[in-house]
Image (tube, grey):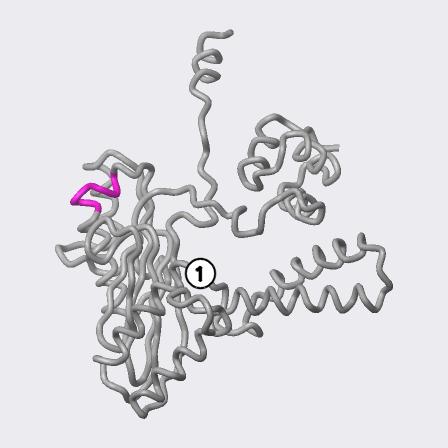
Amino acid sequence: MAEITAALVKELRDRTGAGMMDCKKALAENNGDIEASIDWLRTKGLAAAAKKAGRVAAEGLVGVATDGNRGAMVEVNSETDFVAKNEQFQGFVRDVTQVALAGSITDIDALNAAAYPTGGTVAEQLTQNIATIGENQSLRRSAIVSVNSGVVTGYVHNAAAPGMGKIGVLVALESTAGADVLEPLGKQLAMHVAAANPLALNGDDLDADLVARERAIAEEKAAQSGKPADIVGKMVDGTIAKYRKENALLSQLFVMDGKTPVAEVVAAAGKDVGATITLKGFVRFQLGEGIAKEESDFAAEVAAAAGV
């Protein structure tokens, strides 16, 4: 049996919002496994949805740049939000996003090795920034989106400066329609993606492991209802169908009106201008998602240093 520490209980509480005793019981039932404990709490109706479990922890900026039918997005992390407001750091984010766009670079090793506009490589400039700013920084990820004909539109939420902020989105629209039509539509769709956080373009594109995890939770919940097996099966299928609908961009209800599926919004826009418009894809970066930030207990550190 794994030791259930106070720190482990706190982490589970922070990630789920469940009560302390419920968290202790969940960890005990699952041998200290955090992810299994989250699922256990959800099956008992004691934790919020999975999205709450992925709270943002890291600092830095997401940079977004577009050029017609192409777009790039880069996440650069720092230790504190203070550095994200630094002009030198912001300049680096802006430059490295343009480097990624110009070279269509998604591999971080390749991006680090790419030439930096003012000389040397991206990695060398990053090292210099760390030395002069006095705080560790790192390139975390990069994405490129493109279409053969149409536009790629970018959007930044909580912008710290033009083209960079806490959430970045790229949306790709393929069409023969003009940019005067596609750009405003792309901007609205990108704002929707920032707000609704879809996990895939279509329901069938959702990660199989995620769907399997949701199915397992749904099966356990449905089994607790005491209903016949055939009814339980229908309940589970209905839950998964709802999960696919709510987490796929094309079937989500458009945040601008709260009632029209995104697929219908795109189709209607194409009909209005007499040209087919296809939403080919999207990318959404939320600063620090999936990174757990270490939280220090200052009082405990002082006590430990004093030998208390």
Please identify the quarter of the rendering in which residue 233 is found: bottom right
Q: Is residue 177 above or below residue 93?
A: below
Identify the residue at image location x=62%, y=62%.
Answer: 209
Please report the residue visible at 32 percent of the width from the left and 87 percent of the height from the top.
272
| Residue 82 point in image, percent of width and height | 26, 36
In the image, taking residue 103 as reference, residue 259 lies left or right, namely right
Q: Is residue 272 left or right of residue 133?
A: right
Percent across and percent down for residue 184 are 26, 73
Q: Secondary structure at mark 1?
A: helix
Residue in the image at 58% along x and 35% along y: 13
Q: Mark 1: which amino acid?
A: Ala
- Residue 93 horizontal side relative to residue 21, left or right: left
**Residue denoted by label 1:** 196
Residue segment shown in magenta: 83-89
- Which quarter of the rendering shows the N terminus? top right
* Number of numbered tags placed on the structure image: 1
Q: Based on the displayed image, in which of its 4 quarters is residue 171 positioned?
A: bottom left
Task: Tell me the residue at 72%/40% (across/down).
Answer: 30
Residue 88 colored in magenta in the image: yes
Q: Is residue 308 magenta?
A: no
